[in-house]
Amino acid sequence: MRKFAPLATLAAATLALAACGSADDASTEASADTVEMPADSALAPITDAPVADPSATATDAPEPAVPEAVATEAGDAAADVAAKAAAAAEQPAE
């Protein structure tokens, strides 16, 4: 029990010090003038007209991540490696 006595005393002192803080209320700073002013400016009408982007079209297809020829060559190379591995697995061990 004596091991916990200093810890309990320290905890009680910390709580007592925390209770001595200021009594400012957060709601006093949130008056209608300070809260509604940013909201009113956000709801102001927009007078700018939208501008079309000439480079954007709905018919443009996305570019492939890998060019077609490179993808085909890579697929063929993978098939060759798989065929060689299968052939090597079928040969009896010496």
Image: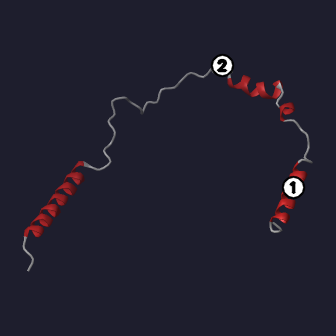
Q: Is residue 92 above or below residue 70?
A: below
Q: CA distance from mark 2 to mark 1?
A: 56 Å
Q: Is residue 5 above or below residue 39?
A: below
Residues marked 2 and 1 touching at CB (< 8 Å): no
Front residue of 10/20: it is: 10
Residue at the image position 74 percent from the left and 28 percent from the top: 38
Tag 1, which secondary structure? helix
Horizontal side of 17 relative to 73 (left or right) equals right
Horizontal side of 67 relative to 30 (left or right) equals left
Name the outermost residue toward the front: 1
Q: Which x, y percent locates residue 3?
A: 80, 68
What amino acid type is highlighted by mark number 2? Pro
Pointer 1 residue: 12
Q: Image quadrant of residue 29?
A: top right
What amino acid type is highlighted by mark number 1? Ala
Label 1 environment density (alpha carbons within 10 Å; few <14, some 14–19, many ≥20)? few
Q: How many marks?
A: 2
Front residue of 15/62: it is: 15
Q: Is residue 1 above or below residue 27?
A: below
Q: Which x, y percent locates residue 58?
A: 37, 29
Residue at the image position 89 percent from the left and 38 percent from the top: 24
Residue at the image position 84 percent from the left and 64 percent from the top: 5
Q: Image quadrant of residue 43?
A: top right
> Mark 2 or mark 1, which is nearer to you?
1
Residue at the image position 84 percent from the left and 35 percent from the top: 26
Checking the image for residue 45, the label placed there is 2
- Dividing the image into 4 quarters, which one contains the C terminus? bottom left
Q: Which x, y percent locates residue 19?
A: 89, 47
* Mark 2 vs 1, N-terminal side: 1
Label 2 environment density (alpha carbons within 10 Å; few <14, some 14–19, many ≥20)? few
Applied colour scheme: secondary structure
Tag 2, which secondary structure? loop
